[in-house]
Amino acid sequence: MTEQSPLSALAGEGPLLLFGGTFDPIHLGHLRPAEEVRQRVGAERVMLVPCGDPPHRPPPGTSGEHRLAMAQAAVRGRATVEVLDWEVRASGPSYTVRTLEWLRERLGSRPILTIIGSDAFTQLHHWYQWERLLELTHIAAVRRPGTAVDALESPLAEALADRWTEEAATLWQQSAGAVMAFDVTRLDISATAIRASVAAGKSPRFLIPRDVEEYITAHGLYRDGT
């Protein structure tokens, strides 16, 4: 497969921050927390990873190409964030561990920090090959409304018991294996609600970047309610 992404982030120093999602559509509730984690860690940039074929939920109603294009539109001209197209281009389910393996082959021992919302974080033990994640990455557990990052069930609680840190420096000093909780600005924005709003003929302005709004309008996305 030909690599098509401008992967300048892979040439940097310090932790590479990853933030994946279906991004259907990408909105400010995705972008602002990722930026706040980046600032606290002191990393150069965040790499957004639109999911191609999510194995944990029904397929998005919007194609991977559209969701990738919206993510690219959202960050156009912003030096602190890039978009990785690998999951959209790759065949097969978009397992996080698979993406991390692909990146680890290219990064060697450079630290990777994967940003995960608290709702998904508490269910991490249901992910494909979840035990391998901390061999490949650090985890930034971002607190979201209604879910606490410390409300963990067995066996996840036991697996992470000695992994927690409160020091961002730890994320620079080793390539993987630590977990850190982050409090961020709580923007209760829902992609589902945005899609419903567009389908009803309402504007999503100030919930999504303007370039994303223009892309949705230009391509007639979400008009049918999907």
Image: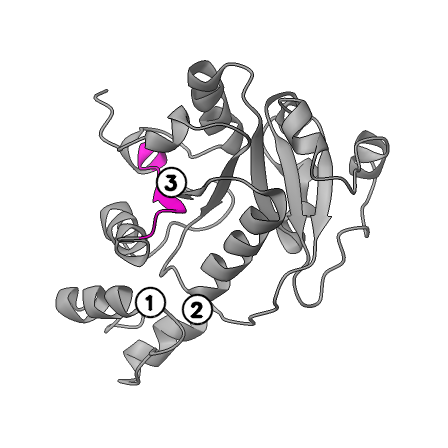
* Residue at 35% from the left image edge and 61% from the top image edge: 25
Which dot marks residue 209? 1
The residue closer to the viewer here, 126 or 172, is 172
Residue 153 screen position, x and y as percent: 82, 44
Q: Are marks 1 and 2 in contact (CB under 8 Å)?
A: no
Q: Is residue 200 above or below residue 99?
A: below
Q: Is residue 120 above or below residue 195?
A: above
Report the quarter where the N terminus lies: top left
Q: Earlier in the sequence, mark 1 or mark 2?
A: 2
* Residue at 64% from the left image edge and 22% from the top image edge: 132
Residue type at mark 3? Asp
- Which residue in the structure is indicated by mark 2? 192
Q: Nearer the viewer, mark 1 or mark 2?
A: 1
- Which residue in the structure is indicated by mark 3? 53
Q: Earlier in the sequence, mark 2 or mark 3?
A: 3
Residue type at mark 1? Pro
Q: Is residue 81 magenta?
A: yes
Q: Are marks 3 and 1 in contact (CB under 8 Å)?
A: no
Q: Which residues are magenta?
A: 78-87
Mark 1 Cα shell of 10 Å, populated few (<14), some (14-19), many (≥20) = some
